[in-house]
């Protein structure tokens, strides 16, 4: 599990890698929330290109960060999910509240 | 059901074992030479079932989670995840999409939805105070050889 967050002109990109399950989501959540609360980005893109596994814990992680960003006046996008992760995202109906590229 | 091969894996209800359970299933399934998608489907369903046992079955307590994986005749994968935790009062309600009893932990309420859509068959037996057993099956695509 890894997170690399960069920020430029009010937009942030969080490059995630490894597996997202109930166990790893806790640390990811803490790190992302710390950044969101401190930096209050207008846009945060979570890059899923390096995520090799995700179950429904990832859906909870995305929904929670989307809510926090909205409360801080920002929004969330999901970038580059692998086809298999797209299936989990589709099942959750997340596409209706978060832009997936 | 004709069993070709079978393993049983028992683990304490620690969240770090969610990944271990997936690794066990991946290793076992190699003998059936599944597609990448089939392997992902089963791994995800197992991850959901084991997480449910840890988060809901043994909420705040410790116990054992038992994972059984079988390869059945006709290229069918059988999974059983069993806990001796608190049990589910209303299984039908628990299986409703987006229903969760742990919103503060950001559980999305999609565990059973994922299991039922990624596997061919899903059954849940539960008794309050005794525990929950989830069984799932998935038939793998036919092989040329």
Image (spheres, rainbow, N blue to C red):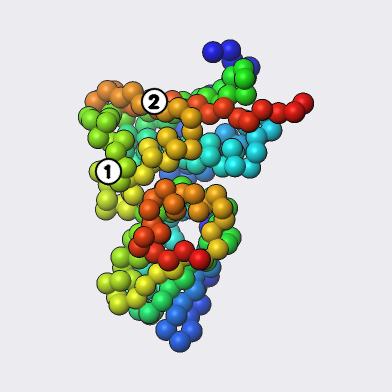
Asked if one can make out residue B61 in the rendered structure from this viewpoint, the answer is: no
Q: Residue at x 41, y 76 (%)?
A: A43
- Viewer-proximal residue, B32 or A17? B32
- Labelled disc at residue B99: 1
Instruction: Specify the label residue B123 is tagged with.
Output: 2
The quadrant holding residue B7 is top right
Residue A87, position in %: x, y? Answer: 49, 49
Mark 1 secondary-structure assignment: loop
How crowded pointer 1 is (Cα within 10 Å; few <14, some 14-19, many 20+) is rated as some
Q: Chain of mark 1?
A: B
Please tell me which residue is depicted at 53% across the width and 59% down the height of the picture. A81
Residue at 29%, 38% in the rendered image: B96
Per the model, the C-alpha gap separating discs 2 and 1 is 17 Å
Q: Is residue B90 visible?
A: yes
Which part of the image, by quadrant, shows the N terminus of chain B? Answer: top right
Is B143 on the left or on the right of B136, as rendered?
A: right
- Residue at point 23%, 30% (across, down): B90
Disc 2 on helix, strand or loop?
strand
Assess whether mark 1 and mark 2 are in contact (beta carbons under 8 angstroms).
no
Q: Nearer the viewer, residue A96 or A88?
A: A96
Chain of the residue on which disc 2 is drawn: B
Residue at the bottom extreme, as displayed: A9
Q: Residues within 10 Å of mark 2 (few under 14, many from 20)?
A: few
**Quarter placement of the C terminus of chain B:** top right
Q: Where's residue A31, x and y in %?
A: 42, 66
Q: Are marks 2 and 1 on the same chain?
A: yes
| Residue B54 falls in image quadrant | top left
- Lower position in the chain sequence, tag 2 or tag 1: 1
């Amino acid at each position: 599990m890894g997170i690399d967050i960069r920020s430029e002109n009010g937009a942030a990109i969080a490059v995630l890698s490894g597996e997202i399950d109930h166990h790893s989501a806790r640390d990811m959540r803490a790190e992302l929330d710390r950044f969101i609360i401190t930096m209050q980005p207008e846009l945060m893109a979570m890059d899923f290109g390096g995520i090799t596994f995700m179950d429904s814990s990832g859906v909870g992680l995305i929904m929670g960060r989307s809510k926090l960003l909205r409360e801080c006046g920002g929004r969330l996008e999901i970038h580059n999910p692998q086809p298999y992760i797209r299936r989990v995202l589709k099942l959750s109906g997340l596409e209706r509240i978060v832009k997936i590229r | 059901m004709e069993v070709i091969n079978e393993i049983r894996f028992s683990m304490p209800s620690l969240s770090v074992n969610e990944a271990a359970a997936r690794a066990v299933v991946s290793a076992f399934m190699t003998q059936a030479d599944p597609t990448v998608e089939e392997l992902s489907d089963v791994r995800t369903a197992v991850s959901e079932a084991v997480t449910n046992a840890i988060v809901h079955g043994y909420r705040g307590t410790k116990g054992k989670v038992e994972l059984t994986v079988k390869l059945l005749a006709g290229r069918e994968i059988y999974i059983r995840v069993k806990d001796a935790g608190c049990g589910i009062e209303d299984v039908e309600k628990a299986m409703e999409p987006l229903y969760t009893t742990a919103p503060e932990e950001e559980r999305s309420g999609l565990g059973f939805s994922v299991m039922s859509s990624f596997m061919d068959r899903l059954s849940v037996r539960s008794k309050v105070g005794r525990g929950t057993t989830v069984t799932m099956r998935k038939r793998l695509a036919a092989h040329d050889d």
